[in-house]
Amino acid sequence: MDILQIESDAIEAFAEALKSDKSPFPSRLNLDPEKLEQGLVRLVLTLVELLRQLLERQAIRRMEGGSLSDEEIERLGMTFMKLAQRMEELKAHFEIDDLNIDLGPLGKLLD
């Protein structure tokens, strides 16, 4: 199946869910300051993780394509390792177990 068809199907499913009586979003917001802070941190860390995964895939493609020197490959590897370590530290500090956000009918955000 073509990736565009899969994305199109997911978008249509999401649109149908929005039209139905059952909204995928809560009817009320919980504005507890502590939970709000943790939710915001979780969102930011999730976006950083998504970008990390995209950059890592691009680096692998460039490495396999032969467009990176050995020094550049080593530097990218160290950068990704440091970023992963820092992300784990931040997740532990803010007591966040899972960064994967459920997008309702679209599924989970991260792999």
Image (cartoon, rainbow, N blue to C red):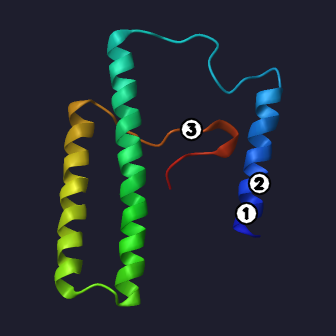
Q: Residue at x 74, y 46 (%)?
A: 11
Cα–Cα gap, marks 3 and 1? 21 Å
Q: Residue furthest bottom?
A: 66
> Label 1 sits on what residue type?
Leu
Residue receiving disc 2:
8
> Which numbered disc, 3 or 2, marks the residue closer to the eye?
2
Please tell me in which quadrant of the rendered image residue 79 appears. Answer: bottom left
Establish if 64 lies above or below 77.
Answer: below
Label 3 vs 1, first from the N-terminus: 1
Q: How many residues crowd around disc 1 within 10 Å: few (fewer than 14), some, or many (20 or more)?
A: few
Cα–Cα gap, marks 3 and 2? 18 Å
> In the shown orientation, is residue 19 left or right of residue 72?
right
Disc 3 vs disc 1: Cβ atoms closer than 8 Å? Answer: no
Q: How many residues crowd around disc 3 within 10 Å: few (fewer than 14), some, or many (20 or more)?
A: few
Establish if 109 lies above or below 103.
Answer: below
Residue receiving disc 1:
4
- Secondary structure at numbered mark 2: helix
- The numbered mark at residue 102 is 3
Q: Position of residue 67 (x, y in %)?
A: 34, 87
> In the shown orientation, is residue 29 left or right of residue 83?
right
Disc 2 vs disc 1: Cβ atoms closer than 8 Å? Answer: yes
Q: Residue at x 50, y 56 (%)?
A: 111
Label 3 vs 2, first from the N-terminus: 2
> In the shown orientation, is residue 88 left or right of residue 109?
left
> Label 2 sits on what residue type?
Ser
